[in-house]
Amino acid sequence: MASEPLKTYRLRRNLLAAVIGVALVALTWAVFGRTTAHEFVDYDDPSYVTAEPKVSAGLTVESIRWAFIGNHSGNWHPVTTLSHMLDAQLYGMNPAGHHRTNVVLHSAAVLFLFLVLRQMTVSQWRSAFVAAVFAIHPLRVESVAWVAERKDVLSGVFFALTLGAYARFVRKRDVASYVVLAVVFALGLMSKGTLVTVPFLLLLLDDWPLRRRVGLIRLLPEKVPLLLMSGATCVVTLMVQSHTISTLEKLPLTWRLSNACLSVATYIWQMFSPAKLAPFYPHLRDQIPLWLVVVCGAGILGVTVAVTALRRVPPYVPVGWLWYLGMLFPVLGLVQVGLQAHADRYTYLPQIGLYVLVTWGVADAVRSRPFGLPWLSAAAVAVLAALAWQATHQTGYWRNSEALWRRAVVVTSRNAVAQTNLGNLLPGADAIPHYEAALAADPESALPMNNLAWVLATHPDYTVRNGTRASELALKAAWETDASDPVILRTLAAAYSEAGQFQEAARIGREALAIAEQQENSALASDLRNQLADIERRVPLRDHSLLQPPQ
């Protein structure tokens, strides 16, 4: 007889879990469903999807082979690449389908996270709240609304499945369960390499909530195959990204360490105050006071020591904090890839640890208080409503490239990337102030130099042209790129011809043509031949497309 009430309880609990799961998916789509009407953006979407022939060709034998052995936009993530190819196969270059896949994958990651936390912790409502915050926090917008960030949402699915497979292995302790764990983890690594720290997270979960307190000597050997997989992924990733890793001269180790401390603190601040979000945050080395770096570093160290050394700290506190730090470590910029100081997308999986810490901590603090549960429930609803509103608002900025970069220019300062990208979307004369702002922010940036020089050299309106300034800018851009970029050399040739230096323009034009032919860039080579013919007739180049916004 005692089993009947237990069966009834389990049935009701499972039915409630099903309802919560449906609600989580509905909430996710309520916030991000609008992205299916968005365009591709000009930031990485071309190199990942729209301008990559092997991706736009769909799933072919050659493209699948390239996904595993090639370099996709400076990264190695074959499963992510295959997902882009599948979208191209199904939807072509219609952005709606690509965006829809991102939302579906994020919804799956949210649902699986809820189910895994519920299974591990046996706490249904706390797990639901963590999953809900993960689903709709405004910091998720970049990962979900940006097609090029498919690797985030796809790795999120395999991350949650890895946790679930590990919990199953802990229960069953058989070879088949471990094989499933290894396969799912491998798929996650091939979706995004930042999952390399997951084996260490599993050691944390052994302590809480799995409570496998049998000693590190017994727990570590079962993680060795997973650690070897992580190590292999690190090696492959460093090999593929070797040409995109910033030089130590540009970002010295001391600054990278300082920026890492600032990033850890910034992401915590954004967790509670997710305002002024942008797709790119520049390094502002001369604007960050030393005392702030010291305070952030000391605070991170102090919290880490406190949560790991104090005996009376609840076990979810060190687990949540170390989850955050550990999963954040690969993207802190200690090995700097790219030019960003930090990025919203880097919080996708690491912040779940903080959500767990705060949720369990607050719930434990108020559960014994009078009227604690009603107040806690009301506060949870209010938090989710506020996050949903702000995330929905933030999602709107990703509707197209111009809206995205106009927002970035407003909410960030000295952002050369945002100013340059916005300038690229405007007619030539309107673009000039943005290129000037980009150069004021980063005087060594070759791209705004080249783009501004092109406008000043080739604009049909004589009141806009300035051959002397164009020559100076283009010459400096060529020097910054070791005179190896045919596009910049083409601009330099156009600038020299506008300045009346046709002999020098012809020489530079021939150099640009030789490089373009060597690179097998037939379209650029054809343009350069036409430009050379005009130079030989002493006719300066006029780009009438600058009178209209780029298409």
Image (spheres, rainbow, N blue to C red):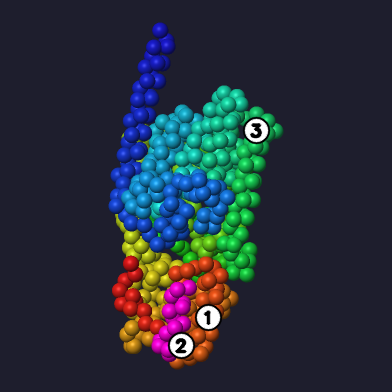
Question: What is the three-letter code of the residue carrying label 3?
Answer: Glu
Q: Residues within 10 Å of mark 1 (few under 14, many from 20)?
A: some
**Residue contact between numbered discs 2 and 1, judged by CB atoms under 8 Å:** no
Residue type indicated by callout 2: Glu
Image quadrant for the C terminus?
Answer: bottom left
The residue to which callout 3 is attached is 222
First-in-chain label (2 vs 1): 1
Viewer-closest of 545 and 523: 523
Q: Is residue 529 magenta?
A: yes
* Residue 73 higher or lower than 370, as above or below: below
Check if mark 1's residue and mark 3's residue have beta carbons within 8 Å: no
Which residue is tagged 2? 536
Of the two numbered discs 2 and 3 on the same chain, state the one appearing first in sequence: 3
The structure residue drawn at horizontal position 56% and vertical position 35%, both measured from the top left corner, is 183
Which mark is in front, 1 or 3?
1
Front position in the image: 307 or 199? 199
SS assignment at label 3: helix
Specify whether residue 38 is painted magenta: no
**Mark number, residue 510:** 1
Q: Position of residue 171 (x, y in %)?
A: 56, 25
Say whether residue 462 is left or right of residue 158.
left
Magenta stretch: dominant secondary structure: helix
Which numbered dot is residue 460? none
| Quadrant that contains the N terminus | top left
Q: Secondary structure at mark 2?
A: helix
The three-letter amino acid code for the residue at tag 1 is: Arg
N-terminal-most mark, 1 or 3: 3
From which residue to which does the magenta span run?
525-540
Instruction: Report the residue at 47% width, 69% height from top.
Output: 522
